[in-house]
């Protein structure tokens, strides 16, 4: 699994989301996900939404994923 594939899976699973994924070893990953679907949700619920986009890859191809999950507003992104 590579960073581009993880990014694509997250963005496909959360329409309109923007994901940035980094890794130094292609096994442990860090991702920042900005999605309007996170509004009103606690951190654990946000993380579950992201994990759902990755399915069985979590714990397999993706050994570890550190997440930062924010809404566009929390990220300082304004609608134009």
Image (spheres, rainbow, N blue to C red):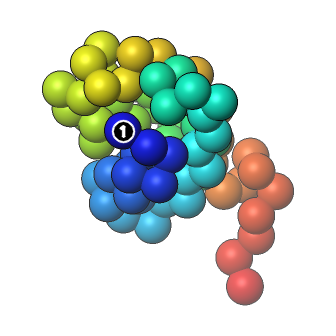
Quadrant showing the C terminus: bottom right
| Residue for badge 1 | 1
Name the residue at 61% across, 33% down.
Answer: 23
Quadrant showing the N terminus: top left
The local secondary structure at tag 1 comes to: loop
Query: Please, is residue 53 above or below residue 72 in the view?
Result: above
Counting from the top left corner in percent of width and height, residue 42 is at 52, 23
Name the residue at 36% across, 63% down.
Answer: 15
Name the residue at the right extreme: 76
On the picture, is 6 further left or further right than 20? left
Q: Quadrant of residue 49?
A: top left
Counting from the top left corner in percent of width and height, residue 70 is at 64, 41
Q: Is residue 27 visible?
A: yes
On the picture, is 32 further left or further right than 59? right
Name the residue at the front extreme: 25
Q: Is residue 14 visible?
A: no
Counting from the top left corner in percent of width and height, residue 69 is at 59, 36
Name the residue at the left extreme: 56
For the residue pair 58 and 51, the one nearer the viewer reads as 58
For the residue pair 37 and 17, the one nearer the viewer reads as 17
Q: Quadrant of residue 62?
A: top left
Q: Quadrant of residue 12?
A: bottom left
């Amino acid at each position: 699994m590579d960073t581009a594939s993880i990014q694509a899976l997250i963005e496909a699973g959360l329409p309109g989301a923007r994901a940035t994924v980094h890794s130094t070893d292609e096994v442990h990953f860090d991702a920042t996900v900005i999605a309007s679907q996170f509004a009103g949700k606690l951190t654990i619920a946000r993380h579950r939404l992201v994990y759902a986009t990755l399915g069985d890859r979590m714990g397999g191809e993706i050994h570890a994923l550190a997440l930062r999950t924010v809404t566009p507003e929390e990220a300082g992104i304004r609608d134009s």
